[in-house]
Amino acid sequence: MPYELKSVFASLPQMERGVAKVIGGDPKGNNFLYTNGKCVIIRNVENPAIADIYTEHAHQVTVAKYAPSGFYIASGDVAGKIRIWDTTQKEHMLKYEYTPISGKVKDIAWTEDSKRIAVVGDGREKFGSVFLWDSGSSVGEISGHAKLINSVDIRQKRPYRLATASDDTCGSFFEGPPFKFKFTLRDHSQFVNCIRFSPDGSRLVTAGADGQIFIYDGTTGERIGSVGGEKAHKGGIYAVSWSPDSSQLISASGDKTVKLWDVGAGTAVTTFNMGSDVSDQQLGCLWQKDHLLSISLSGYINYLDKNNPDRPIRTVKGHTKSIQCLTVHKADGRSYIYSGSHDGHINYWDAETGENGCFSGKGHSNQVSKMQADDSNELVTCSMDDTLRYTNLSKKEYSASDVVKMDSQPKSISASGGFTLAVCIGQLVLLKDKKKVFTLDNLGYEAEVGVIHPGGTTAAVGGNDGKVHLYSIQSNTLKDEGKTLEAKGSITDMAYSSDGAYLAVIDDKKVATAFSVADGYSVKNEFYGHHAKPVSLAWSPDNEHFATGGMDMMVYIWTIGDPDKRVKLPDSHRLHHVSSLAWIDAHTLVTTSHDASVKQWTITY
């Protein structure tokens, strides 16, 4: 194969304020599961840089759960569809598909023999359903609630019991199969967000928006007591998860803490303080083997440390929203990938290990459109908040002084030879030493993208008039040379090769054109292949190849000397086109997309 997927740095869970996030765990304790958009993400607990993404849902997925056998995963979406698919193969073959309820699926539970599934959520005629996994035929009725059901669980020992928790402030207890309603649990005064049987089946716990946690007998459903006395948390509780030995549990709350409880004594062993910001509210948790995981509103996945409650062992960061741009920068012999997303968040990843983090301090407040590392170890970014920022790559924190306010929204930036060229709506701006030195208005065309030649003396600006306009940079000014290059259509992206020999241009007529700089910008070659307009372009460090990504979901890697020699990456991010490309070395390409994940590919020619 000319290409091979090397690594996937997955997106974070998609979070919504005040809505619990259900995290699934695999029965062997190796992986955990969550959802973002139409994707289900499977991640390794020990090393979260190992991930797999399932993309077959047509609607936004809300929850996914492993079967106790470990061979299948059931995932549910906002349209009420349940897909049951194979975990053992790479292709994740679909086994069965059902639509048990007509609204959003909120939770899924399996029986321990992996034969029956309970699904709850929002619906028109009913809020839940329990059925055989292979035929879809009903094995009971989930009734007794007046509002949507948030949570369901099935006791993992015989005799089976099923329990549900709902927005009508009640829980319900069922016996079966076939599952029949037995009685209502009326202890909470607010929405009940989570209900879970202990792994040994002896206890049942409920947690609610009133900040209380109640414990019931797992077989009879009788109330035994509560943990934490009057109130377990100051805020609403969104999730609870049992320890594998059923003696302890963790709870995640909107009061920005996670608590570890001794269930027998009913007291808190440890309180983990996760921060003071709204984005530190805890909306989900999972106890996998020795790992205690919690999910913040920011989407960050925290690995909690029992011995040091105020500092997680590690926090997995990343993006929850679509990634718009990326760049690669080498420091101390290691390559780092920087990615900027739709919500203004910038993340960095170690290309080898996947270790990641984000810039500290207050940064962009809107979509990051383009980024590039300049010669003086700064990351230059432009954003829809009408600013350019220079961020020191060794400090990795935003500086309040290095922000340049633009007159209009910047679309593209290029940094080279001490200069930065910003293409804004209606004007070109030249910057030096983080200050504007020259502005050019009334261009007579709408500029889309601009690049500075590695020599630092020429700037090329592509417009929607289908032309590349060349300017010379003389003593801090841009001088129009009156020379234009013809492309086939409105220009979407362009770049100089790192040795400055070629300028590659892509346009909305689906053509890539390479111009030879030394020959007075004569056309070297034209490259045809995309079925829809290409939107991103990146030169390989070998200066022989460049990659283009288009709206047709394709990525092509072209050879400058031979337009027929190309490597084609189909479906690199199945659901979305590639939004940005960058190279780590001559054989490693990085792609990002609106699925908020970063992928690395090994390319062989």
Image (tube, helix red, strand yellow):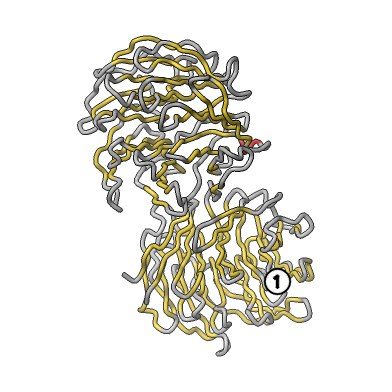
Q: Residue at x 37, y 25 (%)?
A: 153
Along the viewing direction, whichever of 128 and 480 lies nearer the viewer: 128
Q: Position of residue 217 (x, y in %)?
A: 40, 15
Q: Is residue 35 above or below residue 216?
A: below
Q: Quadrant of residue 86?
A: top left
Question: Is 337 positioned to the left or the right of 171 in the image?
Answer: right
Question: Is 237 positioned to the left or the right of 444 in the image?
Answer: left
Question: Which amino acid type is marked by label 1?
Answer: Ser
Per the image, label 1 sits on a secondary structure element best described as loop
Q: Is residue 571 above or below residue 122?
A: below
Residue 122 is at least partly visible in this image? no
Q: Position of residue 473 (x, y in %)?
A: 72, 79
Along the viewing direction, whichever of 465 and 516 lies nearer the viewer: 516
Q: Residue at x 69, y 82 (%)?
A: 457
> Local crowd at mark 1 within 10 Å, few (<14), some, or many (≥20)?
few
Point out the residue furthest to the left here: 135
- Location of the N terminus by quadrant is bottom left
Q: Which residue is mark 1?
A: 376
Q: Residue at x 60, y 24 (%)?
A: 233
Question: Is 21 positioned to the left or the right of 200 in the image?
Answer: right
Along the viewing direction, whichever of 568 and 134 lies nearer the viewer: 134
Residue 100 is at least partly visible in this image? yes
Q: Is residue 428 above or below residue 365?
A: below
Q: Position of residue 227 (x, y in %)?
A: 53, 19
Along the viewing direction, whichever of 533 and 339 lies nearer the viewer: 339
Q: Residue at x 76, y 66 (%)?
A: 434
Q: Quadrant of residue 236?
A: top right
Q: Position of residue 130 (x, y in %)?
A: 29, 24
- Location of the C terminus by quadrant is bottom left
